[in-house]
Amino acid sequence: MTDPRVDHLPPEAAPIRTWHLAFRSRNLVIGGALTLVFVLAALISLVWVPYDITRMDIANKIKPPSVVNPLGTDHFGRDILSMIMVGARTSIAVAVIAVGIGMIFGVPLGLWAAARKGSLLDEVIMRANDLVFAFPALLIAIMITATFGPSAVNAIVAIGIFNIPVFARLTRSGALTLWQREFVMAARVAGKGSARISFEHILPNVTNLLIVQGTIQFSLGILAEAGLSYVGLGAQPPTPSWGRMLAESQTMISFAPHMALFPGLAILLTVLGLNLMGDGLRDIFDPKLRRGRS
Amino acid sequence: MTLLSIEGLSLDIHGTAILRDVSLSVDPGQIVGVIGESGSGKSMTAFAVMQLLPNGAECSGRVTLSGHDMLTLPESKLCALRGDEVGMVFQEPMTALNPIRTIGDQVAETILIHEDVSRADALARAREALNRVELPEDRFPLTRYPHELSGGQRQRVVIAMAIALRPKLLIADEPTTALDVTTQAQILKLLERLVREDGMGMLMITHDLAVVSDMADEIVIMQKGRVVERGPSPAIFANLQHPYSKALLAASGHIPDRVTADTGTPLLEVRGVVRDYRLPRKTLFGAPVVINAVRGVSFTLERGESLGLVGESGCGKSTLTRAILGLEEVQEGSIRLDGQPVFDGHTANRAVRRRMQVVFQDPYGSFNPRHRVERLITEPFHLLDTPPKGAERDAAIEEALTSVGLSPSDREKYPHEFSGGQRQRIAIARALIIKPDLIILDEAVSALDVSIRAQILDLLAELSAKYGLTYLFISHDLSVVRSITDRVLVMKSGEIVEEGPTARVFDSPQHPYTRQLIAAAPKLPDTSAA
């Protein structure tokens, strides 16, 4: 009756309340809007772009922003707005698949380790995670692409591998606290095995954590792809990529700053948007933080 | 002269009424007990005195503490008063101390904030404060860290922090709720002694009538943000006026009507059970430390009987429960239900497990928040080889919900739509649905308000008569065990030290530990004078 947990435990957020709250969080609204703009740009680019990005127009090269080319043209006379739109597609595809790889392998590993806490299996999984964590992600990505040749696929695989331990660790720590809860004990009393409990009771209750971490990893994936492309190890021409657009504009930055500015802004705003969205989601899912800010 | 006087205090938080027209007063040297159930506003009254209110709080009325009008003082003046004039003791000693600082530093901190003294002087006075709360220097040097102390010792440190500056008023908010019975008795004695020695006033906030009835000079009973009754103790208990206070007193000592259906045939037989835990090695080559959680426990539970298992935290009762439920294997001994072993080889025996269920303590933690009631309470069907389907399943859900006093339409709801007491009913429905023979009640009513607790105890008594259930009632709360069990086991350090009919054990305890437990349990005021 006066148990502090009972007194201060907020009612579990029902779906409707969550949506209602979603619009009260400024971070989430701004972040969501920014993210939406880039997702839309990528989707629209599938059916329509202002100019074909493979068509060069040397006569109109390095034009500053104008009515004809809202974000100007590059050193081959290609429309920068069109390139950013198609580039968004590359970034999003790489990030989605990389986060997907991380979740598909990381989450079950984390659940498994938590279910067998303290066993040899737990140790093996977590120490393998530590091993991956011990190396800087970008360095290994460079190594992989250097060995197997630069390509978007290799970049995705390299970034994806480094997402596995992130999700495995997060899932395990979230799951460990849930395993102590009485409803899990009740499921064990009902004779349910650990695999079944993991998917029926643990996984739905760590989804919040995973969604929040997913948006953060998504933005890191975009950054990593931009970084790899910048050094020429990501998507290969003619596939446009924000990172490579930056690299190509580097030598012309003094007389054509718009060529670097717009892809740079695209990276900045997308990453900012995703991070804000992650923060906003965390506020909604974690009532303790939400209260702290109200 | 009155030390603290609260007159017509009303409090709203974000427009929600929390307190309405609360009046009470504390004189120097007086202990005032504020009693109420959760949501009655008793803690908020204390926070209003300290002006430690959440954002959006609006107070009206008057709060005067030794001449200062607390509601109009600026924050800087309030800071000077907090700790100096008023000390506060919180409920949870585990979280009230900073885990990375020594106890000496933490007690000295209060002194350093309020007085211009050197660190050495402050530490010397911290030492003195710790001595006063009976933490002697040879065993508890100032350099100890909170994690090296037990719950009761930590609570003593919290008290030392509160009294270090000899405040005029001490506010104790549920100071013993998180503690074991024997520790609770010691802490209460200590608080009473300090109050008498220093002539402090004390505002003691609790949900437990028994805790304050024999130490408070005055009692204030609160309900839904209002004071419903106040008067001198213990006289007030003989002459309660308000229906709520009468109901509260009645519920605190509630004894459900029960028919004992003891058949004399053994249902659960526990024989020489031993369970050890191996702690991780502290050093690379050192031998691992082994904890004997349960050492050679034997008892028999007869069909239709209600057996109590009493013990303080760490006595091994939870380990024993898990072993009986087949969640953990035991190293030695056997556990049999109706002659069949709970563990068959190294796997739990399904045929046995489907005949017993459990109800846990925390009504908020025992359900997956994402499932509907229907799915929650049918979880034990997993134990059946052919779980009922369709109309049969619907009938089972309906029967389980109706028998615990809920409506069949509640099956569509989520657990967050229910109150604590209702959730505990859902937990009982979940245990009932596969018609078990044995239900283990693991502190099943400990987290409930007294009035709700009385209802749940009645429900349990009714269900045992209706379905011929056998209960194993595990609790640290002696009054609850006394009211609902036929026989009781007293457990200490992994062993059963006393066993016998409940009335006999409570009236003439044989083992010294049992005597100590019973003596320490707070007693309800005697109302026979009424």
Image: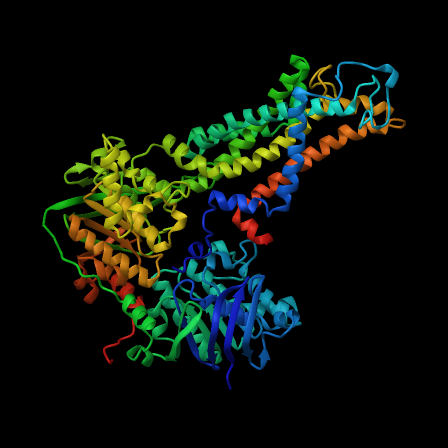
Q: In this view, does A173 lie to the left or right of A161?
A: left
Tell me what residue is drawn at x 46 percent, y 65 percent: B156
Q: Residue B370: image x %, image y %? A: 42, 41
Q: Can residue A217 be seen in this view?
A: yes
Q: In this view, does B105 lie above or below B294?
A: below
Work out whether residue A278 or residue B52 is closer to the camera in this orientation and state it: A278
Task: Please state, as top left, top right, bottom left or bottom right, where the C terminus of chain B lies in the image.
Answer: bottom left
Q: Which residue lies furthest to the left in this view?
A: B264
Q: Residue B7: image x %, image y %? A: 50, 79
Quadrant of the rendered structure where residue B268 is? top left
Q: Residue A161: image x %, image y %? A: 58, 24
Q: Residue furthest bottom?
A: B1
Q: Is residue B51 left or right of residue B153?
A: right
Q: Is residue B409 left or right of residue A160?
A: left
Tell me what residue is drawn at x 75 percent, y 32 percent: A265
Q: Residue furthest front?
A: A67
Q: In this view, does B382 lie above or below B251?
A: above
Q: In this figure, what is the number of numbered marks?
A: 0
Q: Is residue B320 visible?
A: no
Q: Residue A110: image x %, image y %? A: 48, 31
Work out whether residue A284 or residue B482 is closer to the camera in this orientation and state it: A284
